[in-house]
Every structure is written in structure tokens, then in C-alpha cells.
Amino acid sequence: MQTDATSLNGGVLNDDERASIPFVPVRRQDRAMTDEIWIELLLARAPLGVMATAAEGEPYLNANLFVYDASQKVIYLHTARVGRTRRTVGESTRVAFTVHEMGRLLPAQVALEMSVEYASVVVFGEVALVEGPAEAEYGLQLLLDKYFSHLHPGRDYQAIQPAELVRTSVFRIRIEAWSGKQKQAPADFPGAFWYQGLGQLPFPPSSDTLYTQI
């Protein structure tokens, strides 16, 4: 079944909701990114996101694959049918969600001045368990299209089946506000270098590999 955003029940923004999302002020205004396109591009390309929830006074983080749907300004992710994420979301729907990218490490003559390049987005909003099968399939297909973009349903793999939908929990984060930050040094910054472990460790790392890295 093919589904688009305009056919979802309860998942589509009206014209007022499509207006620009408000920005949350950040402490370092010199690093604030207030370009909505910049924020959306980072959300679109980030491979991993972290959702922060809290229930009964206990904070909880879920690091997960996700997809940003620019047509609705929402984030979709999924987990198992049972577990702490689903239980926590069932108790409290207020969430924060963040993505980041790490750039070069920036050495200095003074320890306190050593730094790093980065880009990050923090989203604030409301999370909901997607109840309708049409929207659940839509969100899951967006995830597949993001991470397996070279593969196509019906050609390279079986399209999502109703029986599969009942085995997973699909969540939608409705974005209510966001913030963006970036620190980028000049290309010729003296001594700037990339962290040696960035993207280089095998997965999962063996104990021998970890000890040689220490």
C-alpha cells in the first residue's frame, strides 16, 4: 500500500502549523544557527538521533535510527512493541530530540582553550505512538528510504506487510520548537585534526582493539 503525507489521518499539518517553527535561544548567540533550512538539512542527513524522555522522575535516552519528514515537520522512529521507550512514552509525551556532527579537534597552547568543531540541533516537542496502520507504514517506509535508498519495495524486498506493523512501535515527534548551533574554525586553523577513532573502530569493537586504542 502506497501512502503519502496528504492521506494520513491526524498526521498532516494545516497551513498555520506549516509556518516556521520557533527557535529556542541558545547561550552562545555567536554560534546560533537560525536558518531553518540549515536545521532541516542536518536533521535530514544525520544518521543517528537521541530522544530524551522522562517518567516518574526518571530520565531516559533512546539512541536510534530516525527520519525527518519535512512535509509535516515531524520525526519518525520505531522500537519494539514492548520495552522502556514505549512504556516511558505512554507515561509522558514531552520529549527533546538531538542530532550532532563532530568536526575537527582544535588544539591550543592553553588546555582550557582546546576545542572542537561541531554542528547540532535540539528539537522540543510532543511524541505519540502512531496508531493508524497507514501512517505507521508511511513512517517505516520513510525510514527504509533513508537508510536503504538504493533498494526499492516490490523490487529488492517485499513491501511492508500488515503483519509486520503489529510487531513494531512507530513514534511520531511533532516538532514545536528547535535550536541549532555550529562551531566551525578556518580551514587553515593551526594543528586542527580529526579524532582518530571517528568512524574507524570496527563494530562491535573487540577487547583487543579497545586496549590498543587506550
Image (cartoon, grey):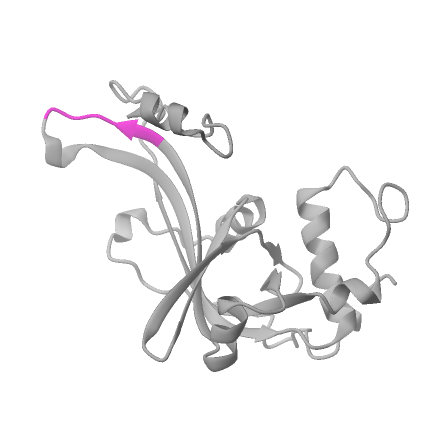
Please tell me which residue is depicted at 90% across the width and 43% down the height of the picture: 155
Position of 131 compared to 58: left or right? right
Residue 108 lies in the magenta-colored region: yes
Task: Pick the residue in front: 85 or 72.
Answer: 85
Task: Pick the residue in front: 59 or 72.
Answer: 59
Viewport quadrant of the N terminus: bottom right
Residue 172 lies in the magenta-colored region: no
Extent of the magenta region: 104-109
Position of 47 compared to 136: left or right? left
Residue 61 rendering spot, x and y as whole percentages: 41, 61
Looking at the image, residue 102 lies above or below residue 122: above
Please tell me which residue is depicted at 69% across the width and 79% down the height of the picture: 10
Kindly indicate the quadrant of the structure image that contains residue 149: top right
Looking at the image, residue 131 lies above or below residue 1: below
Viewport quadrant of the C terminus: top left
Can residue 5 be seen? no
Looking at the image, residue 210 lies above or below residue 101: above
Residue 163 rendering spot, x and y as whole percentages: 81, 66
Position of 128 compared to 162: left or right? left
In this rendering, the count of numbered labels is: 0
- For this orientation, the residue located farthest to the left is 110
Can residue 109 be seen? yes
Please tell me which residue is depicted at 33% across the width and 35% down the height of the picture: 117
Residue 99 rendering spot, x and y as whole percentages: 45, 50
Looking at the image, residue 182 lies above or below residue 165: above
